[in-house]
């Protein structure tokens, strides 16, 4: 996520780590570089000016003491600025009403990720708060659009209100009555997008808004875009009562422009970010955490949260005999957390690690699982009995090559040494797993 930004900021910070003090020309240089990084990332000009002005003010007042290098101070300052620009350290709580129907409306242009975000958010609410949730779509123009939400709802065990009518008013009114009569706590409403915001779309959305009176209206925005998305958001905001934003596709090639510019230009919060196509790929948005990730400090808080959410709350085992059974369990845990790349990204400097070069690929881990599955119980418990003929049988059984078996054994041995030393499995996961947040 936002790897480009991370690399550029890391380079900037690195240049000043060994300096003893900052000269005026150093300050000019920093400002110039920050300005270029932001503009190249498609951050709005007004936002770029605001950030660079703040940094200049702070840098000129700065007293560099010996213990902290200018590089560290610049990093801290950038962290503060980026956090502030995205909404600050103290963000308002995500509130909803108990014993009442809470209505969320999702709007935005076509293809930005409204339908996908609804199912993700429903899943998030269900898992986090165990709420009774109903979904409805009033994207009447494409039959496939309503079917898409219905399919996703069924697949993920979330209730879907299936109204056959193609009259938006009727769909919404019936959905409202149905949710109230069946004591639903949340009604999440999908709407139709268009390629461009036009009069017709605005009219339709104003009508939907007036029927529903939503607690939250989320404007969903594709994170790939910069200035264009900002301009269209301003038009939506002008006509509709938008509560805040969901930025999708942050896992893709987003340069960061929109996520860094929105709050400053609209004064509305970003609530969630989409980080993939799967149902769990939605994160509540914390400006300081994203700012840490952008600067390569990692995002341990989110990682801890994910580990707590996604891994079963098993007792932390102290491992005396680390075998392939346990090894497989650990690989499964990694994959459950969204895969190795997602974890690395949240570790300090993780964004700067080249997962490919280091052969950190989920496919390799899946191959390892297949191989372990085709071993006997004895082989899994005592991997050192795996000789050449066993290797051949295992490879054949898993549909893999002998080389794959050798790679697995080598990797297992590496991890195994490490885990004996630390008396734990993938030690960092375990440390986080038991930490309360
Ligand atoms: P809608 O027209 O606004 O309802 O958009 P959809 O929800 O149908 O999404 C359009 C496409 O974007 C689909 O292929 C989704 O899988 C994809 N998509 C949505 N959110 C994300 C995300 O956070 N990351 C990635 N990589 N793809 C996403
Ligand atoms: Mg849709």
Image (cartoon, rainbow, N blue to C red):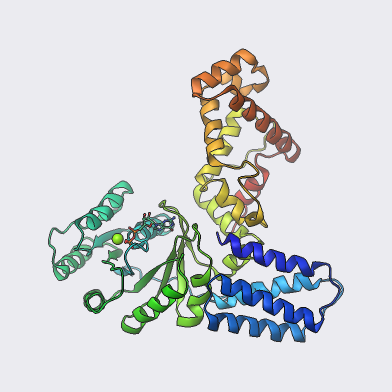
Where residue 276 sits in the image (x, y, percent)? 45, 54
Q: Quadrant of residue 124?
A: bottom left
**Residue 434 visible, this angle:** no
Q: Quadrant of residue 164?
A: bottom left
Q: Quadrant of residue 52?
A: bottom right
If the picture is divided into quarters, which one holds ligand 2? bottom left
Where residue 310 sits in the image (x, y, percent)? 50, 48
Where residue 199 sits in the image (x, y, percent)? 24, 79
212 relative position to 295: left or right: left
Q: Which residue is pictured at 78% across the width and 70% down the height?
A: 16
Compared to residue 159, the image places residue 423 above or below, namely above
Q: Which residue is pictured at 70% across the width and 72% down the height?
A: 76
All told, the count of numbered labels is 0
415 relative position to 162: left or right: right
The quadrant of the picture occupied by the N terminus is bottom right
Q: Name the foreground residue: 400 vs 28.
A: 28
Q: Which residue is pictured at 65% across the width and 21% down the height?
A: 382
Q: Looking at this view, name the residue that lies furthest to the top.
A: 389
**Residue 50 visible, this angle:** yes
The quadrant of the picture occupied by the C terminus is bottom right
Where residue 12 sits in the image (x, y, percent)? 71, 68
37 relative position to 256: left or right: right
73 relative position to 332: left or right: right
Q: Which residue is pictured at 66% across the width and 56% down the height?
A: 352
């Amino acid at each position: 996520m936002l790897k480009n930004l991370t690399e550029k900021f890391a380079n900037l910070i690195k240049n000043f780590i060994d300096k003893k003090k900052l000269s005026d020309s150093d300050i000019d240089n920093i400002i110039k570089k920050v300005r270029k990084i932001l503009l190249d990332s498609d951050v709005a000009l007004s936002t770029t000016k605001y950030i660079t002005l703040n940094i200049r003010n702070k840098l000129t007042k700065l007293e560099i003491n010996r213990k902290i290098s200018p590089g560290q101070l610049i990093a801290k300052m950038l962290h503060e600025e980026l956090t502030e620009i995205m909404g600050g350290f103290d963000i308002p709580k995500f509130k909803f009403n108990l014993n009442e129907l809470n209505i969320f409306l999702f709007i935005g242009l076509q293809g930005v990720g409204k339908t996908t975000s609804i199912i993700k958010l429903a899943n998030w609410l269900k898992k986090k708060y165990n709420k009774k949730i109903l979904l409805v779509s009033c994207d009447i123009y494409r039959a496939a659009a309503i079917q898409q939400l219905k399919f996703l709802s069924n697949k993920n065990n979330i209730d879907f209100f299936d109204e056959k009518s193609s009259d938006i008013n009727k769909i919404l009114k019936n959905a409202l009555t149905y949710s109230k009569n069946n004591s639903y706590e949340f009604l999440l409403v999908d709407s139709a997008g268009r390629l461009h915001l036009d009069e017709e779309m605005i009219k339709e959305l104003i009508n939907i808004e007036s029927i529903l009176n939503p607690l939250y209206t989320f404007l969903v925005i594709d994170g790939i875009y910069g200035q264009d998305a900002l301009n269209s958001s301003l038009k939506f905001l002008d006509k509709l009562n938008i509560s805040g934003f969901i930025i999708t596709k942050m896992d893709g090639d987003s340069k960061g422009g929109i996520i860094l510019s929105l709050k400053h230009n609209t004064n509305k919060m970003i609530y969630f970010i989409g980080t993939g196509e799967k149902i769990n790929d939605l994160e509540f948005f914390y400006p300081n955490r994203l700012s840490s990730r952008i600067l390569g400090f990692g995002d341990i808080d989110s990682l801890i949260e994910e580990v707590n959410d996604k891994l079963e709350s098993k007792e932390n085992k102290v491992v005396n005999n680390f075998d392939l059974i346990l090894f497989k369990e650990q690989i499964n845990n990694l994959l459950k957390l969204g895969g190795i790349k997602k974890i690395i990204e949240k570790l300090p400097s993780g964004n700067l690690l080249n997962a490919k070069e280091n052969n950190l690929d989920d496919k390799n881990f899946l191959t390892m699982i297949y191989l372990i599955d085709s071993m006997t119980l004895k082989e899994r418990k005592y991997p050192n009995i795996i000789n050449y003929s066993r290797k051949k049988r295992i490879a054949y059984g898993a549909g893999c090559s002998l080389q794959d078996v050798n790679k697995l054994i080598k990797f297992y041995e590496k991890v195994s040494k490490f885990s004996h030393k630390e008396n734990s499995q993938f030690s960092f996961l375990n440390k986080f797993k038991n930490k309360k947040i």
